[in-house]
Amino acid sequence: MVDVYPDTRRMSIHSILGKPIWQSLSARPEFASLSVAAIETADSYFNFLLKHGLNKPTAADVILWHNSSDCAGWPMALELLEEAFSVIEPNFLRTIADARNYPVPSAPSVKPKDQASDTVGGRRPTYEAVGWDPIAPPEKRPPIPRKFSIPAEQLPEPYKATLRRAADGLPGIDEDIKVPARSMVVRMREKICQYFWTIAKHDLAPEISIVGIDSYVSELTGRYPDRGHGPRWASLRASVDGLYLLARLHGEANEVMTHLRSYLREFNAREKAQRALKFFELARTGQTTDSVLDQADRLLAGVDAELRPKKRFQMRNGAAILAIFANAPLRNASSQLCFGISLFWDDNHWIIKTKIQKTHDARPELLVLPLHPECGKFVDAIILGDASPVMLPTLRMQALATQRQLFCLYDETPAAATYVPRIFKQLTGNSFTTLRVMHYSDAITHHGTEGIELARPAAHHSPATTSADIVKVHYIAEGIGQLHADRFRARRGARTNAVRDRYRSEFSLSNEA
């Protein structure tokens, strides 16, 4: 006989068989052939059904029962359950067999409150980890071999020290310079590695110099025609900006700083006259937040028709990614939400409370954004999975207690930080960074120019930190001009129709006379 309960909690077989449900079941043919372990396992399962009021349990409910009980291990528990139900209710054997198609369940563990932080339970970008070293080589081999940069560990020691101080939140030689966000430290590291690759190619001194800067910019500009869309001045400006910020922190000579600033002024002016590629991508796909939300609804509605559990799981994840971020256009680094850390259940609503790390600011800003119930249902769909709907409140509380990541893989492994942007691109054909452009475009379309202010809170663009001009250039571009042009054409069309109708009326009256 297999013990399915610890000795301290084990029920007498006579106590189990004394229950009303077992008194009727014991009269079934072949009941005497059941082992004590099978009866104890089935009794544990019946208790679970009664506790949650489950009338038509699913295969996912079998997994939830196993995680909440002290029964045997997963394969043994299913075998004992099959043994019992082969006599009790053979029709249920199909459900038990379906449960075998799911990953081996693991009971969720509740994290102590003192371990809770904004990074616990979520796969954040590497640079957000505590004690991150910007010079350390990656744990995994980069997917693309280096072509135009050197490894960070080959940088001269003084530049390594500057990057490490910035990563630790410490000022550089000029203490008046505000310490940048860690995402900017990553950019600084990549640009200085590219710079040193360039000067090594031209046999220049290993330092930031005027000749070296000219060579670096020339190399960057020369590579763009190969990409099919010519130089992108925003990217060139960002590259020089990363090098300029490092030079400031490192305390480079005034003539070097002046030379970098001259390039920044030139590229800034050129950038303002060039439309960003994301606007062309949106025009190509024709996506809006409305179309993305419609796609999310269709994807979720199709889950019930899918027979494969893994595919149903992926469809729920994809639908939630579309719906949540069409309403809350977060940045890539903030997109991996975690229950009880950045996603909370309050007053029958899911609420996003997360820290937004902006590029040049080392101090993150708090974003609080309630999700409409029509959007919250996608979060609930992920929590519920294939379980019975009556289990939703219990599973909500369990997800919050365990601080599990919202988006996981099918085997319950937390998804990587790149998962959400990658799935969004696969489903929509657009980059994740176009979400705020979609957000503003739809707000302007529905509400006119007043839509800019309505869209600001969700995009985390407060008037105090992001001016209207910056929003127009980077997230609206020609949207307002197009809106005014459309309205002008509509007014002109209305006037033309009015004149035409008046002329026809007068012509008709003159003919009658």
Image: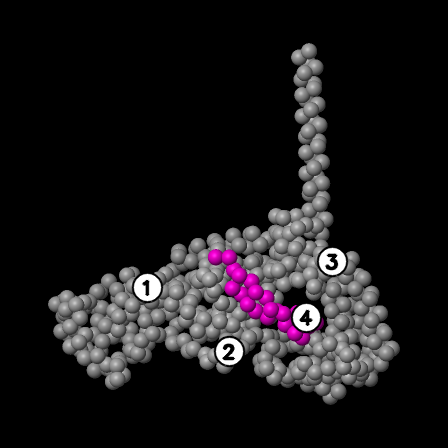
Q: Disc 1 to disc 2, how far (Cα)? A: 33 Å
Query: From the viewer's perspective, is the residue at label 1 or at label 2 nearer?
Result: 2
Q: How far across and how far down the image is residue 402, in percent?
A: 44, 74
Crowdedness near tag 4: few (<14), some (14–19) or many (≥20) residues, C-alpha within 10 Å: some
- Say above or below: 152 vs 363: below
CA distance for labels 4 and 3: 18 Å
Residue ID for mark 1 = 58
N-terminal-most mark, 4 or 2 = 2
Q: Residues within 10 Å of mark 3 (few under 14, many from 20)?
A: few
- Determine contact: label 1, label 3, CB under 8 Å: no
Q: Nearer the viewer, mark 4 or mark 1?
A: 4
Q: Nearer the viewer, residue 62 or 402?
A: 402
Seen in the picture, residue 275 relative to 396 is either above or below; the reply is above
Q: Quadrant of residue 189?
A: bottom right
Q: Which residues are magenta?
A: 351-373
Please name the residue that numbered disc 3 is placed on. 469
Q: CA distance from mark 4 to mark 2?
A: 25 Å
- Residue 385, image quadrant: bottom left
Which label lies toward us, 4 or 3?
3
Q: Does residue 19 show up?
A: yes
Q: Amino acid at mark 2?
A: Ala
Give x and y (percent) for residue 97: 30, 68
Is residue 400 magenta-colored? no
Residue 152: horizontal and vertical position, in percent?
69, 82
Which numbered marker is on residue 116?
2
Query: On the rendered image, what quadrant is the C terminus found in?
Result: top right
Residue 285, percent across and down?
61, 53
The residue sitting at 59% across, 53% down in the picture is 288
Q: Earlier in the sequence, mark 1 or mark 2?
A: 1
Tell me the residue that label 4 is attached to.
359
Amino acid of disc 3: Asp
Residue closer to the observer: 85 or 5: 5
